[in-house]
Amino acid sequence: MFKFITGLLRTRKQFTSRLANLFLGKKVIDPQLLAELESLLLTADVGQETTKQIMIHLTNQVERKHLSDPEMLANVLKAYLIQVLQPCVAPLALSPEQKPFVILMVGVNGAGKTTTIGKIAKQLQAQGKKVMLAAGDTFRAAAVEQLKTWGERNDVPVISQQTGADSASVIFDALQAAQARNYDVLLADTAGRLHTQNNLMEELKKVKRVLQKLDSQAPQETMLILDASGGQNSLQQAVQFNAALNVTSLVITKLDGTAKGGIIFAIANSLKLPIRYIGVGEGIDDLKPFDAENFVDSLFTVEENA
C-alpha cells in the first residue's frame, strides 16, 4: 500500500518531530505535558474545536488512570485521530444505473480543480470508464487550454466554448453529448470563486438547475476542492460551499507543500463529508484515495533523515 510519508513531509516536520520531542525523556503525564500537546495540535491547524475534543478525551483517560505514561498517551492520541477521520473514508463509487455520472468540481481560485479533474480522469480511464470533460471555467482561457491539454494527453474529449460563455450552457452541452455518446462519466470544471461571492455561488446553483433539466439526479457528485495550505480558511470555505451547494464530497490538495496538514482533522470533524482523495504531490499518480489509518500512521512515523 502506498504510504503518505513522503507527501506529508512538511506536516510531519511540524507535527511528528515536535510530538517525538515532546515525549522524549518524559516519564509521567503532567499538566505541562498536556498543555504542550494542546499547543502542538493548535499549531498544526487541527483547529480549536477538534483540539478541545481531543484534549477532553485524553484528560478523561488520564484522570481515570487509564493512561500512566507518555507512550500510552501517544497511542491513544493516534487512535482518536483515526477515529476522527474514519467516517470520512469513502472512495468514489460510480453507480452503473447513473450514466453518465456527473461530477461537478467547485472551489476557490488556485485550489487545483482543473489539475484534479485531469488526474481523476486518468484514474477512471484506467478502470475502463469512458470519460468526458466539460470546460465550465469560462472566465480563464488558460483553464480551458489546460483542460484541453489533459484531454489530448489522455485521449479524452473536452466540450468547450469561447472565453466568457455561460458556464451552465457549456456544461449542459457536455451532458447532452455524454448522454448521446453513452459516456460513463462527465467531469465538469467551474470557475474558481470565493465562498463569500454570493453572485458567483448563485451561478453554481444555476449550473445544477440546468443539468437537472436533462437528468433530475445530476450532478451525482458535487466535489469541493480544498487547498490544505489555506489552513483554517479552507475550513471556512468548506462550510460556506456546503451551505450553498450541498457538497457531497471533498478533495484536499497540496498536502505535500504545507505544514498545515492538520486542517484535515478540523474539516473532517466539522463537516463529516466523504474525503475522496488527497493530493500529496504534483505527479499524475499523486492524487490518492483517502485512507484514514494510512494518513495518521504516516504522521506518527519518525524516520531518520526524514
Image (spheres, rainbow, N blue to C red):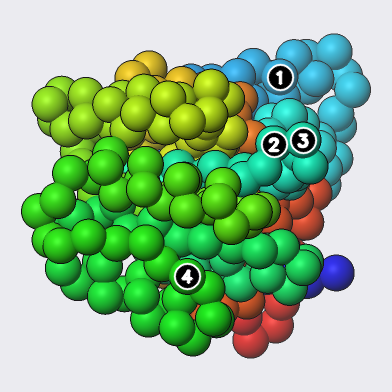
Give, as a three-letter code, the residue at label 1: His
Image quarter where the C terminus lies is: bottom right
In terms of image quadrants, where is residue 166? top left
Nearer-N-terminus badge (1/2): 1
Gap in angstroms between the C-alphas marked 2 and 4:
20 Å
Check if mark 2's residue and mark 3's residue have beta carbons within 8 Å.
Answer: yes
The earlier-in-sequence mark between 3 and 4 is 3
Separation of residues labelled 3 and 1 (CA atoms)? 43 Å
Residue 197 image position (x, y, % from top left): 14, 30
- How far is the residue under mark 1 from the one under mark 2? 42 Å
In this view, the residue in front, 293 or 272, is 272
| Relative to 105, residue 64 above or below | above
Q: Nearer the viewer, mark 1 or mark 2?
A: 2
Q: Which residue is mark 4?
A: 157
Residue, x 52% and y 73% (percent of image)? 156
Determine crowd level at label 3: few under 14, some 14-19, many 20+ residues with C-alpha closer than 10 A.
few
Residue that carries the numbered disc 2 in the rendered image: 98
* Residue 247: mark: none
